[in-house]
Each structure stands twice: as structure tokens, then as C-alpha cells.
Image (cartoon, helix red, strand yellow):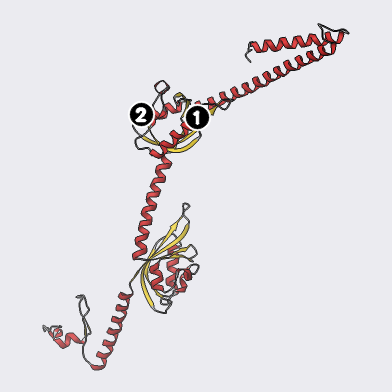
């Protein structure tokens, strides 16, 4: 360790100790008054001088040890600051840059020679930075307070980067403000990814609002228990969401489809694949209704099924019309067979008329005629 020369106060302490050391034996040896003082007084004064000088020496040694420990800690911190991958700035009490590490110069493009003596904002502030956050930083500097914020900086190459600014007010042993140390952690990727996720979430919420308004929507857990339905599902099924949550879809099952139908559906969506088809359900009031249904599995980050979402369109009117048409055709066929006449069914919408086998013979087509069916 480097030898430190004696200071004036150390010489004074040594002299006081020496005087006290002389007075104690003189007082103990003398049985008469010394310079008008009794031997007891001389001994007492000597002891006081020895104790005072010893106390001063103890304080100096303790202070020196604390200083050496602080210097060692500072050297370690300086080494870490130099070698750390994050930019580090040190400012004086006037908020002027005194020092930066190599990572700062590499990241920003500015050297210490360029920026020393200037405030950081002159070099780093971006026009796109949030003014409220900028003012928070200024206020922390004015009030000599620590701060931890996310801020946009602009570097020499003109690119804007998001950083986490961690600022620490530095004080001396008397708690007087002496400067500021700041670490700039690059969080540009994280912030921009977070912003993209927020936009996607907003878009997803907007899409869900549209789907909720125009489609019948239901969500289930991976076991098929209903977790959420929208108001359109409540309207068509006759059940409230409170009645449906925790139940499975057997509550609205109509019995129209065979068991193999449901097994095939579950086999497909159980593999994480979407399924679509027509489903006939029964409402709380006993009314049958048909939906064109898409069941889409939602997978988590591990590729495991997290839930199922069912999107449905009410096609009851179309299916009921088909059923009525089938009944009419069956009735017409039976009537024709009983009466020995032909029959024609014309659909709405301009579709080709349907007739039985007697009609061509009656109108003459079977014999090359040009009969017309109106």
C-alpha cells in the first residue's frame, strides 16, 4: 500500500501524546508541587492528553480504513461501469457530463471528448420523446432524486431507441449532492414488441365486438365446459350465460345427430384442427334451431389446446324450408301415385322445376313432343 505522509493534525496529535506521556511519570515521581500544580493534577492532565491524542489517532485510523474501503468499492464500480454492456453516464452537480463508459460511445456514437461539459439532453433527446417523461427527468435532476423511467433517445445516426433510464443521485459523506450517475438499458425491442401486442389486442377486441354483434359465439375450456357465451347465443338458446357457464353443450343437444357425428368432431378438434358443419340444437323452450358452426381450437405457446371457440350462424329458416320442401315433395309423390297423375314442384328463386316420371309422358316429351310446363 502506498505510504501516506503525515498531515499537520497528525503531528499535533503525536506531540500531545508525547507531552501527556512525559507528564504522567513526572507527576508520579514527584512528591512536591510542580509549577504550582500538585502531582495528582499533573498526572490527571497527562492522562487526559494521552486519551485525547489516542482518540484522535483512533478516529484517523478508522476514517482512513473507511476511505480505503470506499475507494476500493469505487474502483470496482468504475471497473464494472467500464466493462458493462449498458451505457453509463456520470454528471456533476451542474448536470454536465464528466465521464461515460465505452458502451455509451459504442451505442450512441458520441465520444467522451465530444460530450464532456454538456448536458445529456443536448445529444440524446429525441423529438419523439414523451414530453411528460422528459419533464419528470428534469424534475428529478432539479430535486436531486433517483429516477427510473422509459424514455426515447435519438443517437448520432438519427435512429430513435427506447431505453430504461436508471438515474441515481450521488452524495458525499456529509449528504451533499455532488452529481448524478445514469445507466441506459436498451429496451427498444421489448417496448416496440409490447406496442405491437397492444395494437393486436385492440384489433382483436374490435374484431370480437363485431363477432359478438353478428355471430353466435361460445367459448369452452379444453374439456368442453362452457366458459362464455355472447348475447346472440342467449337469444337463440333461451338460456342465460349464468345458466350455461360450467355446463357442456349436451344442455342444448337436440338428439338430431348420431353419436358418430360428435365423435368425429371431437376427434378433429382434439388434434388442434378446426371443424365446421351444420348442427341442430334445441332451445330451452324445446324449439329446434340449426347453425352453420366453426369450432376453432386455441393453442398456448407450447402447442397445447387451451380452449375452444365456436362461431355460429343461424340457418334455421333455410333448414326449415328444406324440411318443408322435402315433406311437400313426399306428399306430392304419394298423391300422384294414388291419383295416377303427374306432378310438378316449382321452387322460389328460379331453380329448375322438379317433376315425377309421369309428367314427360303427359305433356308429350316422351314421344318427341314440345310440351311446356308453366
Q: Residue at x 44, y 24 (%)?
A: 96
Examine the rendered structure and indicate whether residue 283 appears above or below residue 113: below
Q: From where the camera sits, is residue 85 visible?
A: no
Q: From where the camera sits, is residue 176 visible?
A: yes
Rounded to the nearest whole Å, what is the CA distance between mark 2 and mark 1? Answer: 21 Å
In the image, 213 versus 274, the foreground residue is: 213
Residue 239 placement (x, y as % from top left): 44, 73
Q: In the shown orientation, is residue 49 left or right of residue 121?
A: right
Q: Which mark is residue 84?
A: 1
Instruction: Determine which residue is flagged by label 2.
Output: 156
Q: Quadrant of residue 133?
A: top left
Q: In the shown orientation, is residue 102 left or right of residue 35?
A: left
Q: Which mark is residue 224?
A: none
Q: Residue at x 48, y 56 (%)?
A: 304
Examine the rendered structure and indicate whether residue 200 appears above or below residue 54: below
Q: Residue at x 39, y 25 (%)?
A: 110
Q: Residue at x 46, y 54 (%)?
A: 300
Residue 284 placement (x, y as % from top left): 43, 77
Residue 89 placement (x, y as % from top left): 46, 27
The mark tally for this picture is: 2
Q: Seen from this angle, which residue lies furthest bottom?
A: 339
Q: CB under 8 Å between callouts 2 and 1?
A: no
The quadrant in which the N terminus is found is: top right
Mark toward the start of the polypeptide (2 vs 1): 1
Amino acid at each position: 500500500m502506498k505510504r501516506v505522509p503525515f498531515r499537520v493534525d497528525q503531528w499535533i496529535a503525536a506531540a500531545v501524546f508525547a507531552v501527556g506521556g512525559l507528564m504522567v511519570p513526572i507527576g508520579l515521581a514527584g512528591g512536591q508541587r510542580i509549577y504550582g500544580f500538585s502531582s495528582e493534577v499533573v498526572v490527571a492532565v497527562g492522562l487526559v492528553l494521552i486519551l485525547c491524542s489516542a482518540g484522535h489517532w483512533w478516529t484517523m485510523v478508522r476514517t482512513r480504513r473507511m476511505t480505503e474501503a470506499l475507494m476500493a468499492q469505487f474502483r470496482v464500480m468504475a471497473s464494472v461501469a467500464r466493462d458493462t454492456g449498458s451505457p453509463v453516464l456520470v454528471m456533476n452537480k451542474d448536470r454536465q457530463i464528466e465521464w461515460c463508459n465505452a458502451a455509451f460511445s459504442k451505442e450512441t456514437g458520441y465520444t467522451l471528448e465530444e460530450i464532456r461539459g454538456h448536458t445529456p439532453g443536448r445529444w440524446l433527446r429525441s423529438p419523439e420523446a414523451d414530453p411528460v417523461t422528459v419533464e419528470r427527468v428534469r424534475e428529478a435532476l432539479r430535486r436531486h432524486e433517483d429516477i427510473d423511467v422509459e424514455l426515447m433517445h435519438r443517437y448520432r445516426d438519427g435512429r430513435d431507441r427506447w431505453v430504461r433510464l436508471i438515474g441515481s443521485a450521488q452524495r458525499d459523506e456529509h449528504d451533499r449532492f455532488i452529481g448524478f450517475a445514469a445507466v441506459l438499458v436498451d429496451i427498444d425491442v421489448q417496448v416496440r414488441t409490447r406496442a405491437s401486442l397492444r395494437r393486436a389486442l385492440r384489433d382483436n377486441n374490435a374484431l370480437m365486438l363485431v363477432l359478438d354483434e353478428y355471430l353466435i359465439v361460445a367459448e369452452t375450456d379444453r374439456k368442453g365446459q362452457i366458459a362464455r357465451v355472447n348475447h346472440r347465443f342467449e337469444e337463440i338458446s333461451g338460456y342465460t350465460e349464468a345458466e350455461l357457464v360450467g355446463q357442456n353443450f349436451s344442455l342444448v343437444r337436440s338428439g338430431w345427430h348420431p353419436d358418430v357425428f360428435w365423435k368425429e368432431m371431437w376427434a378433429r378438434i382434439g388434434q388442434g384442427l378446426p371443424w365446421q358443419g351444420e348442427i341442430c340444437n334445441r332451445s330451452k323452450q324445446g324449439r329446434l334451431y340449426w347453425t352453420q358452426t366453426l369450432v376453432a381450437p386455441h393453442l398456448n405457446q407450447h402447442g397445447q389446446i387451451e380452449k375452444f371457440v365456436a362461431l355460429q350462424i343461424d340457418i334455421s329458416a333455410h333448414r326449415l324450408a328444406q324440411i318443408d320442401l322435402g315433406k311437400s315433395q313426399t306428399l306430392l309423390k304419394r298423391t300422384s301415385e294414388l291419383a295416377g297423375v303427374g306432378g310438378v314442384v316449382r321452387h322460389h328463386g328460379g331453380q329448375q322445376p322438379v317433376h315425377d316420371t309421369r309428367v314427360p309422358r303427359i305433356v308429350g316429351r316422351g314421344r318427341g313432343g314440345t310440351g311446356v310446363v308453366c
